Image: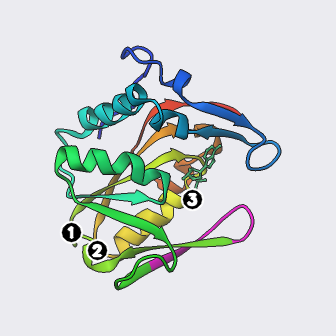
Amino acid sequence: MPSAENPVSSGFNLDDAIRKVPDFPKPGILFYDITSVIANPDAFRYCVESMARLYRSERIDAVAAIESRGFLFAAPFCERLGIPLLLVRKKGKLPGKTIGRKYALEYGEAEIEMHVDDIPVGGRVLIIDDLIATGGTVCATAELLRAGGAEPVGVFAVIGLPFLDYTACLGDLPVTTLIEYFGE
Ligand code: AMP
């Protein structure tokens, strides 16, 4: 799988386009906000074109996109490369037959679901989200895909926070990001 690109050296300063909001949603958290990226056509285009370039020559049978900000980047990427887009949603949102996975949050737990019939058995699936922090959501998605008979082959997030140690639960599943931050 491809490695991360440096957004500055590739000619676009993505950092400038990401709004940073201190103490949101609670004190001590620095929130990296991608609404300022999708509100900026140059920044949004830079992200989608970078994704297309990174994965153009990979064999990917489907993308699993994580609710809800992951959908925003996964949808134009899948349309551009002609890849099926599968939605990973919070419990109770999908109308068809689903499989689900519970996972731990900082306080309590959450549950995600996918339409079981959309998961390509034996297929290679790329997981897409806007940001990867602890990796808990992505790990639960990878487990869900394996339970459905597919093979997660990589993770893409626009933003990575490697100091939150997302590799701990991902094993050797490769993670590609466009920009990384090293503190909150
Ligand atoms: P995690 O499961 O810990 O990797 O959390 C990932 C999800 O939480 C992503 O979908 C992000 O949208 C959101 N998230 C976690 N931390 C932040 C942060 N500091 N800034 C923005 N979004 C975050």
Answer with left or right where residue 76 lies relative to residue 7: left
Which region shows up in magenta? 100-108
Rendered residue at 45%/30% (across/down): 40
Query: Mark 2 falls on what kind of element?
Result: loop
Q: Which residue is mark 2?
A: 149
Answer with left or right where residue 48 lies relative to residue 178: left
Label 2 C-beta lies within 8 Å of the nearest ligand 1 atom = no
Is there any visible trace of residue 154 in the rendered image?
yes
Distance in Å between CA atoms under marks 3 and 1: 24 Å
Residue type marked 3: Gly
Query: Mark 3 falls on what kind of element?
Result: helix
Q: Is residue 78 above or below residue 5?
A: below
Q: Which mark is residue 136?
A: 3
Q: Which mark is residue 122?
A: 1
Q: Residue furthest bottom?
A: 97
Residue 126 is situated, as x and y percent measured from the top left of the image, at 32, 53
